Image (cartoon, rainbow, N blue to C red):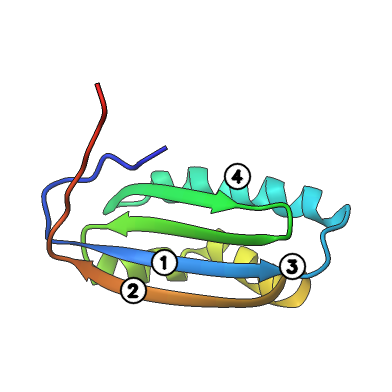
Amino acid sequence: MLANTPKPPYYSVIFASEKVEVTAKNDAYDIMASQMLDLAANQPGYLGVETVANELGEGITVSYWQSLETIEAWRDQADHKVAQKLGKEVWYKRYALRIAKVEKAYEFERD
C-alpha cells in the first residue's frame, strides 16, 4: 500500500534492516512492529508509511514526516526508544537509517 503524502516538501525516514535468524522470536517482533506503526501514525507530523519485508528477514520501511523536528520527536518517543533498544539487542543483525528531504513526488495509477 502506498502512502498518501501531501505535496512536497516533506521528509522521509528510510529504515532498511536484516533480522537475526528468522525464528519464533519474530512473533514478538511482529507484534512490536505493528504497535510501532500504530504509534507512529498518531504522532504529530506523521504523514504515512510504506513497508515491505521478505521471508529472509530483510525489510525496508519508509515513513514520511512534515519536518526534521517531528522525526526527532518520533525518535525520542518513549515506547519507540524501547523498541529501538530491543531491535539492537534481540532482533536486528544490522540496519541502516537514512533521512531525506522529498522535493518532488510523482505517482501513476492504472485505471
Location of mark 2 (residue): 99
Dot 4 or dot 3: first in sequence order is 4
For label 2, the SS is strand
Location of mark 4 (residue): 34
Give the residue drawn at x 79%, y 54%: 26
Give how far apart the Cα atoms at labels 4 and 3 are.
15 Å
Give how far apart the Cα atoms at labels 1 and 4 are.
17 Å
Give the residue drawn at x 82%, y 59%: 22
Q: Position of residue 9 (x, y in %)?
A: 12, 61
- Amino acid carrying label 1: it is Ile
Give how far apart the Cα atoms at labels 2 and 1 are.
6 Å
**In the image, is 111 to the left or to the right of 82?**
left
For label 4, the crowd category at 10 Å Cα-Cα, with few meaning under 14, some 14 to 19 and many 20 or more, is: few
Q: Position of residue 35 (x, y in %)?
A: 59, 46
Q: Position of residue 90 (x, y in %)?
A: 78, 71
In the image, which is nearer the foreground, mark 3 or mark 1? 1
Q: Are marks 2 and 1 in contact (CB under 8 Å)?
A: yes
Location of mark 1 (residue): 14
Q: Position of residue 82 (x, y in %)?
A: 63, 66
Dot 3 or dot 1: first in sequence order is 1
For label 3, the SS is helix
In the image, which is nearer the foreground, mark 1 or mark 4? 1
Dot 2 or dot 1: first in sequence order is 1
For label 2, the crowd category at 10 Å Cα-Cα, with few meaning under 14, some 14 to 19 and many 20 or more, is: some
Dot 2 or dot 4: first in sequence order is 4
Give the residue drawn at x 27%, y 39%: 4
